[in-house]
Amino acid sequence: MKDLLLSIVLGAAGAVFSGQAALASCSGMALGPPPLPNGGPPPYFMLAASRDAVQKVPAGQLRIRFVGHSTFEVESPQGALVQTDYNDYIRSARLPHIVTMNNAHDSHFSVSPEKSIPHVLRGWDPGGGVARHNLTFRDIRVRNVPTNFVELGEGRLSNGNSMFVIEAVGMCVAHISHLHHYLSKHQIRELGQIDVAFAPIDGMWTMSHDELFRVLGDIRPRLIIPMHFGSMSGVEAFVARASEKWTVRRHDSDTINVSLRNMPQKPEVVFLQGH
């Protein structure tokens, strides 16, 4: 575990002191998990191969790829491609069918999504109401659970954020998003049984680690994939605390295939390569 902690901190330090500036107001944009297998620093723009070059997802599985910051690609066996927190800073070369944007925060949404994207799901209602989404496309379903959002200097914005849930092959994947508060009993019921959670571990820009671990305890995912990295000390603190409860490991690429059959019996934290 000491080696894992050290590699994570050194990986983050390499990103901080390489002269690269953060791409947006979330300081987590500048940091990342352990360095890539070849020892180089994690790139700031990670582009997948073209759609034609990507292999079909096997039946009964979901392909999850960490694009960067809080953006993931989730792909189903029928080729439905969802990209979370679609934004104007980090883009995949693959054009998704569905994009989700948790809130109108600069590194978490796009001002002008590509017009060729069939479904653009915003986690807030521009008209001031409550955003509601329940979309089925091919073999995948995407729905949202509205939450509040706190913007520094602006105060609390009611229903300004959403947690999105992606369902396929009998599994549920939750993007915890830029959450800033504990979940209510109603929100936990709305989420339902969660198998995989994308968890922001910065410890300050979203919520404290105390708040995050309470939320994770409430939704009880079997697989936790960190995102939205913060300071070196924040990453180290998250890993140290998580390792007291769960197995913490580092995957050898930015992509992982998950299924009901290969899910861990006890909760695990898996860092995907990325930033």
Image (cartoon, helix red, strand yellow):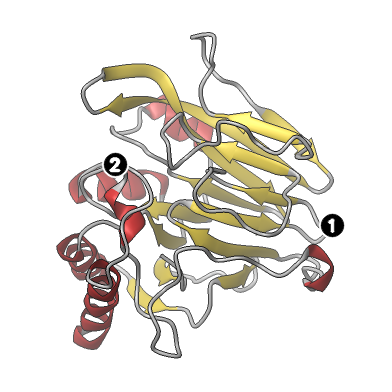
Could you say which disc has been placed on residue 23 in the image?
Answer: none
Q: Secondary structure at mark 2?
A: loop
Kind of residue sitting beneath label 1: Gln
Kind of residue sitting beneath label 2: Thr
User: In the current view of this chain or complex, which residue is farthest to the front?
Assistant: 19
Please give the residue where the numbered disc 2 appears in the rendered image.
206
Name the foreground residue: 90 vs 8: 90
The answer to whether 130 is drawn above or below residue 79 in the figure is above
Q: Secondary structure at mark 1?
A: loop
The answer to whether 83 is drawn above or below residue 158 in the figure is below
Q: Residue at (84%, 45%) from the top-left corner?
A: 138
Image coordinates for residue 198, horizontal then vertical, percent: 46, 54
**How many numbered marks does the figure carry?**
2
Assess disc 2: are there few (<14), some (14-19) or many (≥20) residues with their C-alpha within 10 Å of its C-alpha: many
Image coordinates for residue 246, horizontal then vertical, percent: 32, 69
Image coordinates for residue 116, horizontal then vertical, percent: 79, 39
First reached walking from the N terminus: tag 1 or tag 2 = 1
Q: Where's the N terminus, which quadrant?
A: bottom left
Quadrant in the rendering for residue 207: top left
Please give the residue where the numbered disc 1 appears in the rendered image.
78
Quadrant in the rendering for residue 34: bottom left
Describe residue 180's horizontal placement relative to residue 122 as left or right: left
Describe residue 2's horizontal placement relative to residue 106 as left or right: left
Q: Residue at (78%, 52%) from the top-left corner?
A: 80
Name the foreground residue: 48 vs 207: 48
How far is mark 1 from mark 2, CA to CA? 34 Å
Q: Where's the C terminus, which quadrant?
A: bottom left
